[in-house]
Every structure is written in structure tokens, then in C-alpha cells.
Image (cartoon, rainbow, N blue to C red):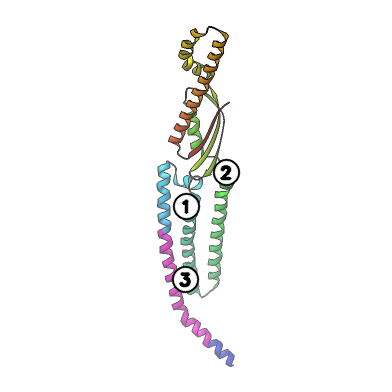
Amino acid sequence: MAIFNQSVKYDRRIKMMTPRTTALAIAALLFALVIDGIVFFLAIKGEWKNAARAGRPFHQYLRREADPAAVAVILEDGAACVGVVIALIAILLTQMTGHHYWDAIGSIGIGLLLGGIAVWLIIRNQELLVGPSIPPQAREQVVRILKNNPLVEDVIDLRSRILSIDNYRIKADLSFNSSELSKRLKKKALAAYPEIKSEQDFELFCQNYTEDVLNMLAEEIDKIEAEIQRQIPEAQHLDLEAN
């Protein structure tokens, strides 16, 4: 009987403390919602500007090109806001119905939410672990720059890799236009040709002509690389070779 009386008294104490405890819990959750909401808004605002600057739809930019750290912040704070709302609903339903299984349902819901975000982040960052290719738009831009050069006849092979968020490595094998190259060297070759009087002069002419070809190719490759880096600042490592 004494044990029963003590149990009744304990149950009454719990019931008397519940409204105050609930109010404190709700206040803490609302405070967390405000803080996480502000951080979430600022993160979204920053990436929205980056997407607009890159000329991409926000969802596409966030999924493919955004900084993984920024994506993690957005998802974590977004999940925190949703989790707080779920917790508030679970607490209110528990108080209204008197059934504590709403707390369990709320906890399960928050756990599933966090698990889903973790899986999404794994998929999102998987390519970064193995070195992904540069974005398709950047690749098309590189090919366009190469093919717009009169000396480049064709792009045989183009390989790329993202070393970091703002650091690309691009390697291309190029086929150069021999006709355009000969046109540019024709005037100098014609001026030197009459001076050939002996076999030694001819060897010197061939040597100078070969050096002129190599120097022209090197200068043209430097110009192409400078143009690529001007249009794509992330392309910090370029390797263009004649095939």
C-alpha cells in the first residue's frame, strides 16, 4: 500500500512538472529553429548568388557544381529546421493525446531524415573522391576555344580532372593545320631561300625552318592556354600537345 501511495505521488509530481518542462522544451526548440533558420537562409542566399553568377539553375548548380562544404551546411541546417518542426509536432501531439508513442514516431522521423541526407551527401561527394571530370559547360568552352584557333585542325583527345573546387587539370592532344602553319612561315622561308648556295646552307635553312615551326607552335599553344585561363580561371593546369 505504501509503495502504491508513493507511486501515485510520483505520478502526480510528473504531471505537475510536465507543462513547465514542455514549455521549456518548446522554447529551446523555437530558439534552435530561429538560429538554424538564419544560418540556412544565409547559406541559401550565398549559393543562389553563385548559381546566378554561373548562369545555372539553382538546383542544378547545387547538385553538380556547388562547394560540397556549402551543400553540407545547407542540408544540415535545413534538416535541423525540419527536425525541430517534427520535434515540436511530436511534443504537442504527446501533450494533446497523452500517448507517448508520438515521441518515438518523431525520433524515428528525424533519424530517417538525417539518414537520407547522409546518403545524398555520399552520392553527391562520391565523384570528388575519385577525381571527376570538369563540368560539361567548361569542357565545351575549352573545345570551342581550341577549334576557334586557325592553327588547330582538330581536337584528338581531351581529358580533364577536378583537383579541387577552383582547380582544374586539362590535357588535350591537338592536330595542327599544316596549311595555315606554312602560310605563316612562307614569307620568312622565301626570304631565306635565295641565300641557299650549298648543301651546308640548305642544312642551315632546314634547321632554322624547323626551329621556326617549333617556336610558332609553342607561342600559339601559350596563347591558347592564356585564353583558356582567361575564360576559365579554374583551369590552372593545362597540357596541350601536338599529336
- Say which element carries label 1: helix
Residue type at mark 3 is Leu
Q: Nearer the viewer, residue 198 or 44?
A: 198
Q: Is residue 235 above or below residue 43?
A: above
Within-10-Å neighbours for mark 2: few <14, some 14–19, many 20+: few
Q: Nearer the viewer, residue 17 or 185?
A: 185
Q: Disc 3 vs disc 2: which is toward the camera?
A: 2
Q: Is residue 49 above or below residue 225?
A: below
Residue 147 appears in the rendering:
no
Query: Which residue position holds label 1?
Result: 70
Q: Disc 2 vs disc 1: which is toward the camera?
A: 2
Q: Is residue 83 above or below residue 170?
A: below
Query: Which residue position holds label 3?
Result: 92
Asked if labels 1 and 3 touch by Cβ distance under 8 angstroms, the answer is: no
Q: Upstream in the sequence, badge 2 or badge 1?
A: 1
The CA span between labels 3 and 2 is 48 Å
Residue type at mark 2 is Gly
The CA span between labels 2 and 1 is 19 Å
- Say which element carries label 2: loop
Picture quarter containing residue 6? bottom right
How far across and how far down the image is residue 153, in percent? 52, 23
